[in-house]
Amino acid sequence: MSDSPYLEIVELADGDVILQSADDNQGEPLVRIRFAPEIVEHLRGGKL
């Protein structure tokens, strides 16, 4: 993990949303959220 005080929220190509250090996009994410298909449909494809 980086020592950067900045974090970013990123939506990945597979639809997962992750929280990661802003300057360490090659490491493991701090948090990963995967929405169930039913929820994605309910949200009409929008997550962020």
Image: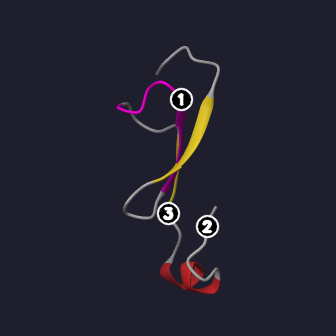
Dot 1: few (<14), some (14–19), or many (≥20) neighbours within 10 Å?
some
Above or below for 15 versus 30: below
Q: Residue at x 35, y 32 (%)?
A: 26
Residue 37 position in % (x across, y down):
49, 81
- Secondary structure type for disc 3: loop
Residues under labels 2 and 1: Cα distance?
20 Å
Q: Quadrant of residue 48?
A: bottom right
Magenta-highlighted residues: 17-26
Amino acid type at mark 3 = Arg
Amino acid type at mark 1 = Ala
Image marks 3 and 1: residues in contact by CB distance under 8 Å: no
Tell me the residue that label 3 is attached to. 34
Residues under labels 3 and 1: Cα distance?
20 Å
Tell me the residue that label 2 is attached to. 47
Q: Is residue 42 left or right of residue 28?
A: right
Q: Residue at x 38, y 60 (%)?
A: 13
Image marks 2 and 1: residues in contact by CB distance under 8 Å: no
Residue 22: which numbered mark, if any? Answer: 1
Above or below for 48 versus 26: below
Residue 31 position in % (x across, y down):
54, 44
Amino acid type at mark 2 = Lys
- Secondary structure type for disc 2: loop
Dot 2: few (<14), some (14–19), or many (≥20) neighbours within 10 Å?
few
Is 20 in the magenta? yes
